[in-house]
Image: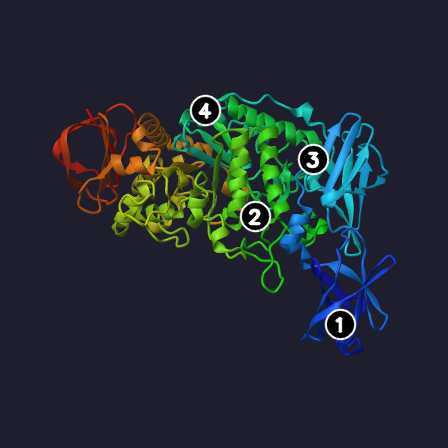
């Protein structure tokens, strides 16, 4: 669309290539010559090609010399008309990336009591201004910023501006836009303005936690800050808030622990919180009116305000999140942050798009924004300053908030090099930082060999990925509610189940392995997405009694905890969490999403069973084998009649057998010679023997997981 004040359009598409569009209604779309002008200079353009497209003539032109970004250029045709030269596809070229890559670690605000520096990367802007507003004032001060090398604009204010609101005005393509700093660290309510804060006032000492020796020693428990405490019988005072999620020694109606203290007793090692960077979908000033999981990112380096006691106070969300993380660390657990660097909430309204239009997002062959994420935009992580932004952001969360690991939402949208740089940066801060992600192969215009997908796991050997093959083989298809997996009695998955239980590293079928090493596999049958396992079981077994469904649930969850790799539990999975059949609760009310702590009391036996399995996993290293090579040498499949699955762990003088019977009938098997202590059966689990079985013929209970230790 050509506006009334423009006769034609012109775009800089490469460093020396300009595309000009002349509508057929303007001199029949014809011009024999064009010039590039700025100030008093006038450079002739060489017309390389002319095409007719949709009521216009398209001219591809070349010019000699270097284009000076930051200066306003014009295109003049032979009719004497002129139009402003807009920045086009040049921003997606390698030449642009090389020219304007900035290595500095000082983008955004660098605060000191009497001097604060502001830096913004805006290489295509022809003007940038800083707007400052005092916390109690009704006026704003406008400060012109100075252009520096690599497309940086800077300003320095030599007085104390703590708590001032700030934003940038950016002039690109002849239009001014007000934007929030993409590197902003504090904001007003609902993220409308940036705020300058003194982070030293919020600092907490870095925790000194006992190192986790290896990723397979991790047990992840996923929850949502609001879900975790909002239930009326959670025993938590600050319901739905950072402070509530961090409360210790809370108790439910039964007098038993809830919240963090309960998780410590359960035995998990890491709490993974759904996104708590600033997101859209909940009005921070009226948080009870709306609900959202948090996958609508607004400001990547700012905590979400709806979880704070005072969203008006920029310090509230910072100090309260830090207190939550500190409380988690105090009881010896760790925090994984769910991060959403694959897209923004609304591309057109994002600071990225307003500051450097088109740069931060991928575009398809016809120049339209790609949509592999399904939400209207894909972050172009392969571009140098986008990659830098992601790495800088991850570094900031680790250094400022002491985050222990990251879960990358839709990691397959991002590229291998970016994820490799993320892992390298994290390990430089704390060796062994856990990085996990969703390595789905999504339809985004990035070469297949560059995508951070499961298929490219060998290129990212120290990043773990959610194992959807494990999920679907053990539970049944996530996308077909009525499909049953091995743990639900489908013995067609027997061989595949043996493979995923043993780390998906090719123990049973050489050449078909999913991962090179077991620690790359995050094993799960339930997460925040899709139906809970309990709700799937209700759909798959509508005529079964509750006890039968509980057995299937216990079996599937037990398989997660005793398989090779990294086990992942959804909060409440241990007490049969239900969302009343809701399969996508991303904005459903608390009644659907809340963690119902009364179910913990109601299903205490199952909670104790899961605790017992966690004890077994932690006590016996055979359930946490470090390498693929050791899995191949230490695990020996046993020949049982389908649908029973079993294998023997043998290392040094320790022998352990795991046997699974997913059928609803007793099955008879033949045990190796010796006396076998039963550590886990259909109803009990723990590190103490509950019975002893003799070698030879034995009956295995229906729908059961059994762990036997040779005496």
Query: In the rendered image, which residue does mark 1 sit on?
Result: 22
Residue 597: percent from the left, percent from the top? 46, 32
Of mark 4 and mark 2, the one earlier in the sequence is 4
Residue 397: percent from the left, percent from the top? 59, 33
C-alpha gap between disc 1 and disc 3: 43 Å
C-alpha gap between disc 4 and disc 2: 30 Å
- Front position among marks 2 and 3: 3
Of mark 2 and mark 3, the one earlier in the sequence is 3
> Mark 2: which secondary structure?
loop
Q: Are marks 4 and 1 in contact (CB under 8 Å)?
A: no
> Mark 3: which secondary structure?
loop
Of mark 1 and mark 3, the one earlier in the sequence is 1
Query: In the rendered image, which residue does mark 2 sit on?
Result: 342
C-alpha gap between disc 2 and disc 3: 23 Å
Q: Quadrant of the N terminus?
A: bottom right
Q: Quadrant of residue 633?
A: top left
- Front position among marks 2 and 1: 1
C-alpha gap between disc 3 and disc 4: 31 Å
Of mark 4 and mark 1, the one earlier in the sequence is 1
Would you say residue 591 is visible in this rendering?
no
Residue 20: percent from the left, percent from the top? 73, 67
Query: In the rendered image, which residue does mark 4 sit on?
Result: 211
Q: Left or right: 559 with respect to 645?
A: right
Q: Which mark is residue 106?
A: 3
Of mark 2 and mark 1, the one earlier in the sequence is 1
Residue 286: percent from the left, percent from the top? 66, 39
Of mark 3 and mark 4, the one earlier in the sequence is 3
In the depicted structure, whether residue 99 falls above or below residue 462 = below
Would you say residue 264 is visible in this rendering?
yes
C-alpha gap between disc 4 and disc 1: 65 Å
Extreme-bottom residue of the structure: 28
């Amino acid at each position: 669309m050509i506006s009334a004040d423009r006769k034609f359009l012109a775009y800089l598409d490469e460093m020396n290539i300009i595309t000009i569009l002349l509508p057929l209604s303007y001199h029949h779309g014809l011009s024999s010559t064009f010039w590039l002008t700025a100030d008093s200079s006038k450079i002739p353009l060489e017309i390389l090609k002319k095409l007719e497209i949709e009521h216009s003539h398209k001219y591809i032109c070349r010019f000699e010399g270097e284009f000076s970004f930051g200066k306003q250029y014009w295109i003049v045709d032979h009719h004497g008309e002129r139009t402003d030269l807009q920045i086009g596809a040049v921003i997606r070229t390698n030449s642009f990336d090389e020219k304007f890559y900035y290595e500095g670690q000082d983008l955004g605000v660098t605060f000191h009591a009497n001097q604060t520096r502001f830096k913004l990367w805006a290489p295509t802007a022809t003007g940038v201004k800083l707007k400052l507003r005092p916390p109690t004032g009704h006026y704003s001060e406008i400060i012109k910023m100075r252009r520096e090398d690599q497309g940086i604009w800077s300003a320095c204010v030599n007085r104390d501006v703590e708590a001032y609101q700030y934003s940038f005005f950016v002039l690109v393509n002849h239009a001014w836009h007000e934007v929030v700093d993409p590197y902003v660290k504090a904001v007003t309510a609902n993220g409308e303005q940036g705020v300058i804060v003194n982070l030293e006032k919020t600092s907490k000492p870095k925790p000194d936690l006992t190192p986790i020796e290896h990723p397979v020693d991790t047990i992840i428990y996923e929850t949502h800050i609001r879900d975790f405490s909002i239930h009326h019988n959670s025993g938590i005072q600050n319901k739905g808030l950072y402070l509530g999620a961090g409360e210790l020694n809370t108790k439910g109606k039964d007098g038993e622990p809830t919240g963090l203290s309960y998780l410590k007793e359960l035995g998990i090692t890491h709490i993974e919180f759904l996104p708590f960077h600033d997101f859209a979908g909940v009005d921070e000033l009226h948080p009870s009116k709306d609900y959202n999981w948090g996958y609508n990112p607004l400001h990547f380096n700012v905590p979400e305000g709806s979880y704070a006691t005072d969203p008006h106070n920029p310090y509230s969300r910072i100090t309260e999140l830090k207190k939550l993380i500190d409380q988690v660390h105090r009881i010896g657990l760790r925090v994984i942050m769910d991060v959403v660097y694959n897209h923004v909430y609304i591309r057109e309204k994002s600071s990225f798009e307003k500051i450097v239009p088109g740069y931060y997002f991928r575009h398809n062959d016809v120049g339209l924004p790609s949509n592999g994420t399904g939400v209207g935009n894909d972050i172009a992580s392969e571009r140098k300053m986008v990659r830098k932004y992601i790495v800088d952001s991850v570094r900031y969360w680790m250094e400022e908030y002491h985050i222990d690991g990251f879960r990358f939402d839709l990691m397959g949208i991002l590229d291998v090099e970016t994820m490799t740089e993320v892992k390298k940066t994290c390990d430089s801060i704390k060796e062994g930082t856990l990085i996990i992600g969703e390595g789905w192969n999504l339809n985004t215009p990035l070469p297949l060999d560059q995508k951070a997908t499961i298929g490219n796991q060998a290129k990212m050997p120290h990043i773990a990925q959610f194992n959807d093959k494990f999920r679907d083989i053990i539970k049944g298809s996530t996308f077909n509610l009525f499909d049953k997996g091995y743990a639900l009695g489908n013995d067609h998955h027997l061989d595949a189940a043996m493979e995923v239980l043993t780390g998906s590293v090719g123990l049973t079928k050489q050449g078909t392995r999913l991962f090179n090493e077991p620690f790359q596999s995050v094993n799960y049958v339930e997460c925040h997405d899709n139906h809970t396992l309990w709700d799937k079981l209700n759909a798959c077994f509508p005529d079964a009694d509750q006890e039968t469904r509980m057995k299937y649930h216990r079996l599937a969850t037990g398989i997660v905890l005793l398989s090779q790799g990294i086990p992942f539990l959804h909060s409440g999975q241990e007490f049969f969490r239900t969302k009343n059949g809701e399969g996508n609760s991303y904005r459903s009310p608390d009644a659907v999403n809340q963690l119902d702590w009364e179910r913990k009391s109601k299903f205490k036996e199952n909670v104790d069973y899961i605790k017992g399995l966690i004890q077994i996993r932690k006590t016996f290293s055979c359930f946490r084998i470090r390498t693929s090579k050791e899995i191949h040498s230490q695990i020996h499949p046993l020949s049982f009649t389908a649908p029973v699955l079993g294998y023997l762990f043998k290392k040094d003088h320790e022998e352990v057998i795991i046997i699974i019977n997913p059928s609803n009938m007793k099955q008879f098997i033949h045990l190796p010679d010796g006396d076998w202590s039963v550590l886990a059966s259909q109803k009990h689990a723990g590190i103490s023997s509950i019975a002893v079985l003799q070698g030879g013929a034995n009956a295995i209970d229906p729908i059961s997981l059994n762990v036997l230790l040779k005496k």
